Amino acid sequence: MDLTKILAITGKPGLYKMITQTKNGLVVESLVDGKKFTAFSHEKISTLEEISIYTEGEDKPLKEVFKAIYDMQEGKEAINHKSDAGELKDFFEKAIPDYDKENVYVSDIKKVINWYNILQTNDMIDFTEEEEEKKEERIEGKDTGENEDIPEATNKQEKD
């Protein structure tokens, strides 16, 4: 799932897909209603790739939060982001048990759940690529580890 072209724009609800870059900003398309408009460079625009959630340990990237919700919901939509605060907190705690309860507000939880549901509705949540990449990395890591030892031994022999 590539979140680099999915945008959140401060002051505008929902999510937007970047279409192209212009001299004054970005042409974006709403994932909610499909309308296109220019988001100007003076507006606060963030890619979802840049956003993370505070946890008791390290901050958790939004992609990992979405993956946790996806796994918990078995690929289905999450609860409504307009549910009451208690329900939202309970839901979020089940997905991300170590989230920082003092620094992550109900408004943040609402946004994350709303964004997840928007992506889910638009069939944009897909973690199969990452699972395949992890398998490939493990295989390549083993090959790389073996190959790195050989040149080091050769280099030591050449130096002596």
Image (cartoon, rainbow, N blue to C red):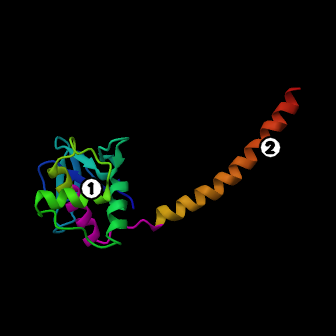
Label 1: element kind: helix
- Residue placed under numbered mark 2 in the picture: 150
How crowded pointer 1 is (Cα within 10 Å; few <14, some 14-19, many 20+) is rated as some
Residue drawn at point x = 75 percent, y = 47 percent: 147
Looking at the image, residue 137 lies above or below residue 157: below
Q: Which residues are magenta?
A: 112-128
Q: Is residue 150 above or below residue 14?
A: above
Classified by dominant secondary structure, the portion drawn in magenta counts as helix
Looking at this view, is 71 or 62 the one in front?
Answer: 71
**How far separated are the C-alphas under marks 2 and 1?**
48 Å
Return the disc, 2 or 1, that comes first in the chain's sequence.
Answer: 1
Q: Report if residue 75 lies within the magenta region.
A: no
Label annotation for residue 26: none
In the image, residue 11 above or below residue 118:
above
Query: Label 2 is placed on what type of residue?
Result: Ile
Location of the N terminus by quadrant is bottom left
Residue 80 place in picture, x, y as percent: 16, 67
| Residue at figure coordinates x 30%, y 52% from the top left | 48
Residue 122 painted magenta: yes
> Quick check: can you spot residue 131?
yes
**Along the line of sight, which residue is nearer the eye, 139 or 33?**
139
State which quarter of the image contains the C terminus: top right
Q: Which residue is mark 1?
A: 93
Foreground: 120 or 56?
56
